[in-house]
Image (cartoon, grey):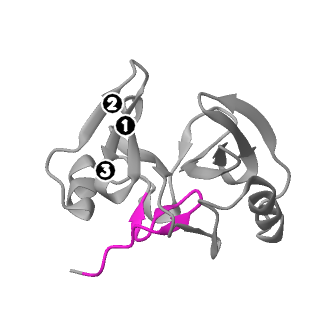
Amino acid sequence: MAARDFATIRPRLGLGTLRFGATRDEVRGYFSVENPIVEDHGTSWEWWNFDVARLSAAFDRDNGDLLVAFRSERPDATLLGKRFIGVPQQAALRLATEAGLGAYASSDIVFGWQAEFEAHELELCFGAGACEAISWRAATGADDRTQWPPRLVRVPAR
């Protein structure tokens, strides 16, 4: 089996070699975990927490229970070749500019705030003056439907 990459954030595509659109079994296999911690907030997304890996994965119940999002709290996580987690807020925002993430909107979250980079479908989450996590998801269209990465476009059976 190829080495599993838990650190490389791939906006709109996935994590390492694991792509958005993966099944629950494919995610279990990638993380080598039979029974992840499941969070159910009564929404269309179900989150699985992989505490040891400091990662969470979300599945869309309304879209075939396929993988649609990640959240990472890993200090070694890289986004566009740069590390953000643990970096002070202003330095992280400068890195975002250097990485070409563009403009962001800000919103409050439970323990701080997040910079939302809508063009990349990702957020840098801040608390205690530093970047604490990065969340990213599959692309969505104007109709709010998931746009799967190219190799995962599902062709209807004939």
Q: Residues within 10 Å of mark 2 (few under 14, many from 20)?
A: few
Q: Is residue 7 magenta?
A: yes
Q: CA distance from mark 3 to mark 1?
A: 10 Å
Examine the rendering and report whether any part of residue 155 can be seen. Answer: no
Q: Position of residue 95 (x, y in %)?
A: 77, 67
| SS at badge 2 | strand
What secondary structure predominates along the stretch shown in magenta?
Answer: loop
- Residue shown at 79% from the left, 57% from the top: 93
Q: Which mark is drawn over residue 47?
A: 1
Query: Pointers 3 and 1 in contact (CB under 8 A)?
Result: no
Residue 49 versus residue 78 in the image, above or below: above
Q: Which mark is drawn over residue 50?
A: 3
Query: Pointers 1 and 2 in contact (CB under 8 A)?
Result: yes
Residue 152, located in which quarter of the rendered image?
A: bottom left
Examine the rendering and report whether any part of residue 151 can be seen. Answer: yes
Q: CA distance from mark 3 to mark 2?
A: 11 Å
Q: Position of residue 131 (x, y in %)?
A: 64, 53
Residue at the far front: name it: 128
Over which residues does the magenta segment extend?
2-19
Residue at the far bottom: name it: 2
- 73 horizontally vs 26: left or right: right
Q: Nearer the viewer, residue 17 or 84?
A: 84
In the rendered image, the quadrant that contains the N terminus is bottom left
- 113 horizontally vs 12: left or right: right
- 152 horizontally vs 25: left or right: right
Q: Which residue is mark 2?
A: 39
